[in-house]
Amino acid sequence: MSIKNAFSRLGITGRKVQRGEIYLIADDLIVLPETRLPSKPGRELHENRPVLILQTNLDNDDPLYLTILAAPLSHRVDLQDQRDFKLSAGQAGLEHDSIVQLGLTQPVLKIALQGEALGKVDDITMNDIDAVLAANLGLIERPR
C-alpha cells in the first residue's frame, strides 16, 4: 500500500478547498431541523445538497484538518429568516436562487465534498455573509 493510499483511507487527501466555494455533499450527511417546514412532518432527502465553505483557508490548506465548517444551502427562499443569507441564481455557479442557512453551520468531512467546486462567492458577498455570521454569534448587533 502506498503512503498516498494510507493517508486517503484516513481521510487525509491534500485536497485544496477554499473559503467561499460551494460544493455538493450527500444530503443525508447534513443535519437540518424539521421545524422550518411546518407543512411537512419529515424532511425530504435529496441526493445532494450544496454547501458553502466558511472555514478559513489557513485551516483548509492543512492536510491534517479532516473536517471543514460549511453551511447548507436551500432553494426554498420562502423559508429565509434573519440567520440566512440569500444568493441569486448565477452567483457562484448556482442554478436557483438559494439561501445559505448560516444558522445551521456544521462540520463536514473534506472527503465528503463531491467533485470540483460549483463556484465561488465573491469577496464582497463573503463580507456580507461574515456580517450575518457575526450577528448570529452575537459579536455584532443584528441590523433591524
Image (spheres, rainbow, N blue to C red):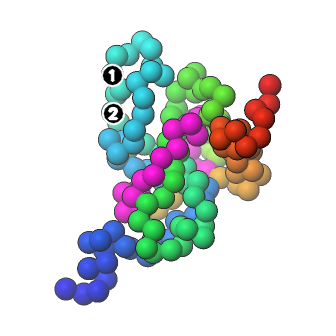
| SS for callout 1 | loop
- Residue bearing mark 1: 42
Q: Which residues are magenta?
A: 92-114
Q: Is residue 51 above or below residue 142?
A: below
Q: Residue at x 65, y 52 (%)?
A: 121
Can the viewer see residue 143 in this picture? yes
Q: Residue at x 37, y 73 (%)?
A: 12
Quadrant showing the N terminus = bottom left
Front-lying residue, 78 or 128 = 128
Q: CA distance from mark 1 to mark 2?
A: 9 Å
Label 1 crowd bin: few (<14), some (14–19), many (20+), radius 10 Å: few
Is 121 left or right of 50, judged from the image as shown? right
Q: Amino acid at mark 1?
A: Gly
Question: Exactly how many numbered labels are in the figure?
Answer: 2
Quadrant showing the C terminus = top right
Queried whether the magenta region covers residue 106, the answer comes back as yes
Query: In the current view of this chain or complex, which residue is farthest to the left?
Result: 1
Residue 133, x across and y down, in percent: 66, 43
- Residue bearing mark 2: 45
**Quarter of the figure with residue 9:** bottom left
Is 101 left or right of 15, judged from the image as shown? right
